[in-house]
Amino acid sequence: LAAHATLLEVLPAMGLEEIAAPMALFVGIGGIGMAMAWVLPPAVGLVQCLRHTQILPFLHHVSSWGVPTTLIAIQTIFITFLCTLFMLEDVGSSFWVFTAVSAQLQLVMYITMFL
């Protein structure tokens, strides 16, 4: 096998082709969980800063669980647009670019919080 072999190439070579689909599903769920762990805490902090400064009052809305729904909705629309652009390539590079864009957006949020 090549050094850059995918999960769907490695598992059949090991005789484990029947677990390839569940493994791909678990990797996808893990990617979503990773994205939520990177997106939600900075959004909560940003809403607290916005409330303190009274800037952009339409972003202050939070749910009964304390989730900043308006800000998360705006982030979701933006990230969905970016992800559709990056899904034109292969999945590996798309995942890497999605991770890099998430980190850059977090950086922008932290810079905004400390201004």
Image: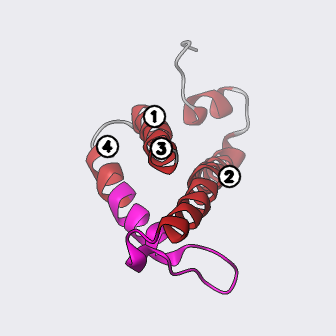
The quadrant of the image that shows the N terminus is: top right
The quadrant of the image that shows the C terminus is: top left
Q: Mark 1 Cα within 10 Å, few/some/many (few <14, many 20+)? A: few
- First in sequence, mark 1 or 4: give its number: 4
Dots 3 and 1: beta carbons under 8 Å? yes
User: Picture coordinates of residue 54 (x, y %)?
Assistant: 45, 72
Q: CA distance from mark 4 to mark 3?
A: 13 Å
Q: Residue at (49%, 76%) from the top-left corner?
A: 60
User: Picture coordinates of residue 92 (x, y %)?
Assistant: 46, 33
- First in sequence, mark 2 or 1: give its number: 2
**Image-based side of 70 in relation to 20, left or right:** left
Q: Residue at (59%, 65%) from the top-left corner?
A: 48
User: Picture coordinates of residue 21 (x, y %)?
Assistant: 62, 51
Q: Which residue carries the number 4 mark?
A: 86
User: Picture coordinates of residue 44 (x, y %)?
Assistant: 60, 63
| Identity, as a three-letter code, of the amino acid under mark 2 | Phe
Q: CA distance from mark 2 to mark 1?
A: 21 Å
Q: Looking at the image, is mark 2 or mark 4 nearer the viewer? A: 4
| Identity, as a three-letter code, of the amino acid under mark 3 | Ser
Q: Which residue carries the number 3 mark?
A: 102
Q: Mark 3 Cα within 10 Å, few/some/many (few <14, many 20+)? A: some
Labels in figure, total: 4
Q: Which residue carries the number 1 mark?
A: 100
Mark 4 lies on a secondary structure that is: helix
Does the segment drawn in magenta span residue 77?
yes
Near-viewer residue (33 or 113): 113
Q: What segment carries the magenta color?
A: 54-79
Q: Which residue carries the number 2 mark?
A: 26
